[in-house]
Image (cartoon, rainbow, N blue to C red):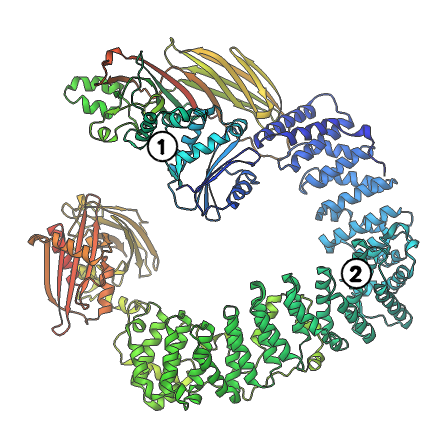
Amino acid sequence: MIGGLFIYNHKGEVLISRVYRDDIGRNAVDAFRVNVIHARQQVRSPVTNIARTSFFHVKRSNNWLAAVTKQNVNAAMVFEFLYKMCDVMAAYFGKISEENIKNNFVLIYELLDEILDFGYPQNSETGALKTFITQQGIKSQHQTKEEQSQITSQVTGQIGWQREGIKYRRNELFLDVLESVNLLMSPQGQVLSAHVSGRVVMKSYLSGMPECKFGMNDKIVIEKQGKGTADETSKSGKQSIAIDDCTFHQCVRLSKFDSECSISFIPPDEEFELMRYRTTKDIILPFRVIPLVREVGRTKLEVKVVIKSNFKPSLLAQKIEVRIPTPLNTSGVQVICMKGKAKYKASENAIVWKIKRMAGMKESQISAEIELLPTNDKKKWARPPISMNFEVPLAPSGLKVRYLKVFEPKLNYSDHDVIKWARYIGRSGIYETRC
Amino acid sequence: MPAVSKGDGMRGLAVFISDIRNCKSKEAEIKRINKELANIRSKFKGDKALDGYSKKKYVCKLLFIFLLGHDIDFGHMEAVNLLSSNKYTEKQIGYLFISVLVNSNSELIRLINNAIKNDLASRNPTFMCLALHCIANVGSREMGEAFAADIPRILVAGDSMDSVKQSAALCLLRLYKASPDLVPMGEWTARVVHLLNDQHMGVVTAAVSLITCLCKKNPDDFKTCVSLAVSRLSRIVSSASTDLQDYTYYFVPAPWLSVKLLRLLQCYPPPEDAAVKGRLVECLETVLNKAQEPPKSKKVQHSNAKNAILFETISLIIHYDSEPNLLVRACNQLGQFLQHRETNLRYLALESMCTLASSEFSHEAVKTHIDTVINALKTERDVSVRQRAADLLYAMCDRSNAKQIVSEMLRYLETADYAIREEIVLKVAILAEKYAVDYSWYVDTILNLIRIAGDYVSEEVWYRVLQIVTNRDDVQGYAAKTVFEALQAPACHENMVKVGGYILGEFGNLIAGDPRSSPPVQFSLLHSKFHLCSVATRALLLSTYIKFINLFPETKATIQGVLRAGSQLRNADVELQQRAVEYLTLSSVASTDVLATVLEEMPPFPERESSILAKLKRKKGPGAGSALDDSRRDPSSHDINGGVEPTPSTVSTPSPSADLLGLRAAPPPAAPPAPSGAGNLLVDVFSDSPATQPGLGPSPEEAFLSELEPPAPESPMALLADPAPAADPGPEDIGPPIPEADELLNKFVCRNNGVLFENQLLQIGVKSEFRQNLGRMYLFYGNKTSVQFQNFSPTVVHPGDLQTHLAVQTKRVASQVDGGAQVQQVLNIECLRDFLTPPLLSVRFRYGGAPQSLTLKLPVTINKFFQPTEMAAQDFFQRWKQLSLPQQEAQKIFKANHPMDAEVTKAKLLGFGSALLDNVDPNPENFVGAGIIQTKALQVGCLLRLEPNAQAQMYRLTLRTSKEPVSRHLCELLAQQF
C-alpha cells in the first residue's frame, strides 16, 4: 500500500505530488527533500526510513520518483511499480525530463489515479491504459456505448492487457533478446564474477486473441521434453543453458509453466516484455581486456591495454568504449592507439577510448603515458578497474529462441501465415577488468 | 591596508565559481572540479614557471574546491611560495591557504615558520599583521612553540604600530588559550598592564581581553590593572560621546571596551584604595543614572549597547556585594525592566534579580517585586523567561512569603511546560520543606504535588516525604489520614500509591480507630491499586501487607490469601515472587512476638543534606549563576531567608537514602525494616523448607561436582591398566569403556557442561553447545599430577556403524601435557541420522613411563539435537493422535530415584531439550513436552508426557516419535533421569 507518490526535479522542487492515504502528511514531501536529495552525504540506498516513514526512490534523468508509505510494504513490489510507472510515462511522452513532466502534469495525475487505487497498484499495462487515458480529452465524447462497455469489460475482465477485435492485414511479430553481460575479471584473466541479465521483448501485431507458445533452449525445458530420445537430449544438452531465475509478463500462464515448463500466453498488442531472466553459468564473454600498468618512478605511469574480440568473425560489435581510470594526481597524458579514438577526459579522471566497429576474433591496443604530480600524502593509488561498453549481435548467455508458435482458432490464419522476426543484442552491463 | 584594486580581481576564479554555481547536479559539479584540478595540476607541473598572479589564482581555486568539501593534496608548495611574495594580495592568499589547509605535521611547517619569522622581523606593519593572524588562526602547539617568545616582545616594543600591537595581543590570547604552558610570563607582563593607558582604543580593547584571561591564573601579577581600569572606565563613562570619534557606537562611548573593563574588575575584590573606590562608585552611579536618561536614539542598537553596560555594571555591583545603596538602585532598575516590552530584557532582569535576591542588602528590595514576578510566571509567553521567573521566586522565597509562593508555583505547575516541570516540582518540594512551619501544611503540599504532577515527582521527593513523616511523630497521624483520603480518588498516581503504601504500612494503626478507615478498608483500598502498579510499587505494597499483618492481626487471613495467590507466588518477577514466598512463610511460621520485632516501626532517619537539593544542584549543573548555587552565598544568608532546617529528633545509623525502602537492592528478602537480628531469624525460619528452586539459585556446582567424584572401586592403576603399548593407537585396539561410563554418561543427558571424568591423574571437563543438527564440544584435559604426560592422544571412536550416523571432527591436541596444566580439545559434531549408542572417547598417554589408557563414552546422545517446539494444546493432541501406531510409542513405568520435585523435573525436562507445554494436559501435575530431533538426513518429531504419582513415588513416561528406535531410546534415556 503506497501512501503517496512524489516526483522532484534535480533541485528537489516538487513537480508531482499525489497522496493516497491520510497517514502521509505534507511534511513527508519536505522530509525526503531534506534528508535525501539535499543530504550532505550522498544517499545510496534506494530505501530511506525517516521518522517511521519509508521512502522508495528511483532516479530518472535527474528527476526523483519517490513512493512513500508508513506500512511495512513489499519493497520489491514498490520498485516494480515505480519502474512500471516510468515505462508508462515514457510510453506516453518519451523521455522523463523535467520539461516533459511539467508539460504533461495533467496526464500524469490522470495516470496516477488509474494505476494506483488507495495505494494499491492496478492495471499498469500501457496498451490497455492508452485506450481510455488519452492526451486528447475530446475523444471520450465520441466514444460509443459499445466502446465504453468494451473498456469496462477489458479493465475488469480476465485478460486486462488485450483488447478484443483487433485486426491486422499482415500478422507480424518481432522478438528481441536483449541481454546485458556483467563481468569482473582479475588482471591475470581469471573471472571473479560474471552474470547475464536478459530480457525477451516482443512486439506483436496479431489479429484477435492468439495463443502463443514460446520455446527456448532452457535446460529444464529441454530435458523435460527430450525425455523420449536420449540422443536428442545429449545433442541439445550441450547447447542448452541454465537459467538461474526468471520472471514473466502477467500474460504468461504460470500454472502451465509450472506443470509443463512451457511458456504460453495471449500477447498484448504492440510492445511488451515477455520475460526477464538471469544466468551465471557458461557465459560467452565477447571481449577480453588485457591491462598492463607499469609505474616508472613517482611521476610517471605507463599503461598498455589490449582488447580481444571473442566471437564469430562474421559478427560486428558496435559502440565500443574502453574507460581507463587515471590517478588523481595526473598532470598530463599522451595516448597512442591503432584503432578508434582515445582521449584523456580530465573531468572524469579517465582515458576514454572509443571504437565504432570491431569484427570478431580481432585485437586492438592502446598505450598511454601518464605524468603525475608528486603529492603530499603517501596514499597509494587504488587502481580502479578498467571498464568497457559495447554492443554485440549475439546473446552472451547462449540463449536461443527455438520456436514461437501462434494459434488463433477463431480467425482463419495459421502459424505459417505469421511473419516472425528475431534478433539478439548483447550489451555490456558492468564489464570490468582489474589492473 | 591596500585595498584590492579592480584590475587585481581574478577573472578565472570568478568564471570557475560561477560555473560551479550553475551546475545542475552534484555529478556535474564533480566533473567540473575534476577538470579544473587536472588543469591546475598540469599548470603546476608545467616546465615554465608561473608568475605570482596565476599562482595566486590557482591557489585560490584550490582553496575554493577545498571549502566545497573535496580533498586537496597538492599546491601547498605553491602557497608557501606565495608567502615570500612582496605583493599584499599574493601574501594574503598564501596565508589564507595555509591557515585553512595546512596540517601541523606537514614537512612544510619549517618553510612556513621561516616565512612567518621573516614577516614578523620585517618593518612592514601589514605583513606583520598577516603573520600574526596566521599564527592565531592556526593556533597549533607547534606554532606556539615557535613564536610564543616573540609575540610578547612585539606587543610591548615601543616602536610597534598600534594595529600590530592589537593583533599581537589577540594572537597571544589565542595561543594562551590553546596552550597556556607555552606562553612565558616575564617582565613584559607589567608592561602589558600599561597598555590600558594606550592612546589607541583598539589596543586597549585587545589588551583588556588578554589581561582578563591572564589574570584569572595569576591575579597577583596583574593587580595594578585595577586602578588603571577604573581610571580608564571613568574616562569613558564621563566623556561626552563625541570624544571617542571612532569608538562611539550609536551615541554610546566604547561599549565593548566598557563591558570588558567591567568584566576585568569582576576578577578582583573591591579596590581598597579609597580614592580608587570612590571613583569607581562614581562611575557605577553614572551608569545607573544614564539608564534613567531618555534614550538618545530610537535605534535598537543604542539601547542594546546601553543595556549591555548596565547589566555588566549590575553584575559588578552584585559581585562586590558591599554597597547597599547601589544594590537597591540596581534592584529598582531591574524592577523597571521586569515590565519592559523587550523579552530579552525581561529575561536578563529576572536572571540578574536571582543573584540580587541572595544578597542581604537587596533581598528585601527584590521581595517588593513578588507580584510582578508571579504575574510573569503566569502570563509570560516565552518558556525560558517563565523558567527564570520560577528561579527568581525560588530565590526570593523566605518564611514570610513561602506559603504564597508555594501555592503560586503549585498552581502554575498544572499548566507548566513539560521541560521545566520536574525542576519546579523539586523547587516546590524544597521550599515546602525548608519553610514549613507546621508539617501538616508540608504533607498537604507534597501530596498535592504528587497529585498534580505525579510523573515529574522523582524518587527523591517522595523518599524525602517519608523521611520527614517518619522522623516527626506529630504529623504521622495527619499524614496517614491525608494519604488515606488521597488514595480514595478513583485514579491516583503511582507515586501516591507508593507514599500511601508506605505510610499506611507504618502508621495505619493511627487512623484504624475510625470505622471509615478500619484495617480491612485500608487494605482493600491499597489492594485495589495493586494491579495497576509497576513491579517496584507492588513489591513495596507486599511489604505494606506484611506490616498490616503485624499491625492488624485481623487482616492476616485475607493477606495470606493474597500472598498465596498464584499471581504472587508464581510471579515472573523474582523479587515479587521472593517477597511473596518469604512473607507468607514468615506470617505463618513466626509467632506474634517475632513478627512484632521483625516488623517494628521504622526508626527515624539520620538527618543529612536533603537529597532533593542535591538533585536540583545536579540538574542545574555547576556555574548556574542563580541563588541555588550555594557556593556563591555566604552562610549567613540562610538566616536572612529565615529558613529553618527541620531538625531530627533522634539519630540512628546512617544509610543512603536511595535504599530507604530496600527496593533497589535485589537480595534483601526480609521486610524492609529488618534489624540486624532478623536476618538470622529468617534463615532459621526457612531452613526447614524443602530444597528450594533449583532454577533460581545459582546451580549448586560444587554439589554437582562432588557427586561426580568417581566411586573408584579399583585402584586407579588397575583401572588404567592396559597392557597394549601406546605405540600406534588404532581404533581397533581401544579397550572397552570403563564400567562407570554409562553412569557418567547419564549425568550429561540433561546437562551440557560439567566434569566428565576424574581420577588421581586426570580430570576431563566438558563444555558443549548444540544447535539443530550441529554441535561443538570442548573437552578440557587437566593433568592433576606434577609430572608431564607424554604421548597424550585423545581419540574419538565410532563403534559399529555409528560413523554413518554421527560425524565427529576432532582437532589434534599437543602430545605433552605439563603437570598441573590443562589442554583443550574442540570437537565438531554433526548428527547425520538418528543414533543409539554414543561414540567412545579413548585417551592414551604415558605417565612416568607407564602407558595409560582410558575409554569413556562421549556425552553425545540423541536428545542433544532436540529442538524445542511450542504448540497449542489442540495441535499437540492432533499430533499425538497421528503417532498412534503401537511401535511409535514407548512407555515406561518406573520408580523415582530422586525426590519428586516439580521444579527439578521441569528443569530436567528443559535440559533434556524438549519444550514444556503448559495448559495442555488436563492434570496440572503432569508434564507435556514437544520437540524435533534434527539430523542431517531427517527430522524426527517427538512428543512426550510424564505423569508423576507422588503417593506411589512412581512415574509413567510416554514417548511418541515417528521412529520406533528413537522412541525407545529416548524413553530409556529419560527414565534414568528421575
Q: Residue at x 73, y 66 (%)?
A: B339
* 1 vs 2, front mark: 1
Q: Name the residue under label 2.
A: B307
- Position of residue A383 measured from the top left corner of the image (x, y, whole percent): 52, 28
Q: Can residue B956 be seen in this view?
A: yes
Q: Is residue B851 above or below residue A162?
A: below
Using a 10 Å C-alpha cutoff, classify the residue at mark 2 as few (fewer than 14 neighbours), some (14 to 19) or many (20 or more): some
- Position of residue B517 measured from the top left corner of the image (x, y, whole percent): 40, 86
Disc marking residue A123: 1
Using a 10 Å C-alpha cutoff, classify the residue at mark 1 as few (fewer than 14 neighbours), some (14 to 19) or many (20 or more): some
Front residue of B597/A263: it is: A263
Q: Residue at x 86, y 72 (%)?
A: B272
* For residue B539, side relative to residue B812 (left or right): right
Res. B232 image quadrant: bottom right
**Chain letter of the residue carrying label 1:** A
Residue type at mark 1: give it. Asn
Q: Is residue B500 above or below residue B878?
A: below
Q: In this view, does B522 lie above or below B104?
A: below
